[in-house]
Image (spheres, rainbow, N blue to C red):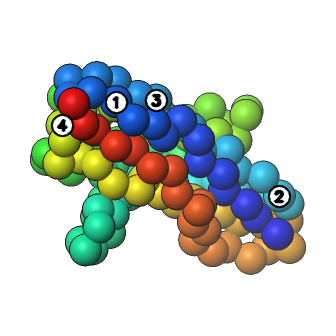
Amino acid sequence: QVQLVESGGDLVQPGGSLRLSCAVSGSILMIFTMGWYRQAPGEQRELVATITGGGRTNYADSVKGRFTISRDDAKKTGYLQMNNLKPEETAVYYCNADVRQYNGRREDHWGQGTQVTVTS
């Protein structure tokens, strides 16, 4: 069983910063790509950023230059540093991980989400 637990969501003023964490646990042989997605009320879930096992990153155009995705494979944890946050970025932020387990299964897994609210 694989679990992803996000943390770090909070209420922040416009222009503020937050760091989200995603801890992966379970019978894990390898974590491939990790990603962060967000979903605002009434909207579809959208990609924010991804990072491969080799460290290659990809960002939505709207967050380039402000957000940084990273990972610590020893801790099985992914991070999303968000700077200069905007009110329209208020959403539930979800972590995703492509995981191979010791039993050979490889699947995408999602966390339960963490709320980020940007408001003055």
Q: Earlier in the sequence, mark 2 or mark 1?
A: 1
Kind of residue sitting beneath label 3 = Arg
Please tell me whether mark 4 sits on a helix, a strand or a loop: loop
Q: How far apart are the alpha carbons under marks 3 and 1?
A: 11 Å
Kind of residue sitting beneath label 4 = Lys
Neighbours of disc 1 within 10 Å: few (<14), some (14-19), many (20+): some
- The residue at 71%/65% (across/down) is 100
Q: How many tags in the picture?
A: 4
- The residue at 67%/73% (across/down) is 106
Q: Position of residue 9 (x, y in %)?
A: 48, 40
CB atoms at circles 3 and 1 under 8 Å apart?
no
In front of the other: label 1 or label 4?
A: 1
Q: Position of residue 89 (x, y in %)?
A: 24, 47
Q: Position of residue 50 (x, y in %)?
A: 39, 50
Please tell me whether mark 2 sits on a helix, a strand or a loop: strand
**Residue to which mark 2 is pinned:** 26
Q: Earlier in the sequence, mark 3 or mark 2?
A: 3
Q: Earlier in the sequence, mark 2 or mark 4?
A: 2
Neighbours of disc 4 within 10 Å: few (<14), some (14-19), many (20+): some
Left or right for 20, reference 27 = left
Left or right for 115, reference 40 = right
**Residue to which mark 1 is pinned:** 12
Residue 66 in view of the camera: no
Q: How far apart are the alpha carbons under marks 2 and 1?
A: 32 Å
Q: How far apart are the alpha carbons under marks 1 and 4?
A: 9 Å
Neighbours of disc 2 within 10 Å: few (<14), some (14-19), many (20+): few
**Residue to which mark 4 is pinned:** 86
Kind of residue sitting beneath label 2 = Gly
Q: Earlier in the sequence, mark 3 or mark 1?
A: 1
Rendered view: 100 above or below 74: below
Kind of residue sitting beneath label 1 = Val
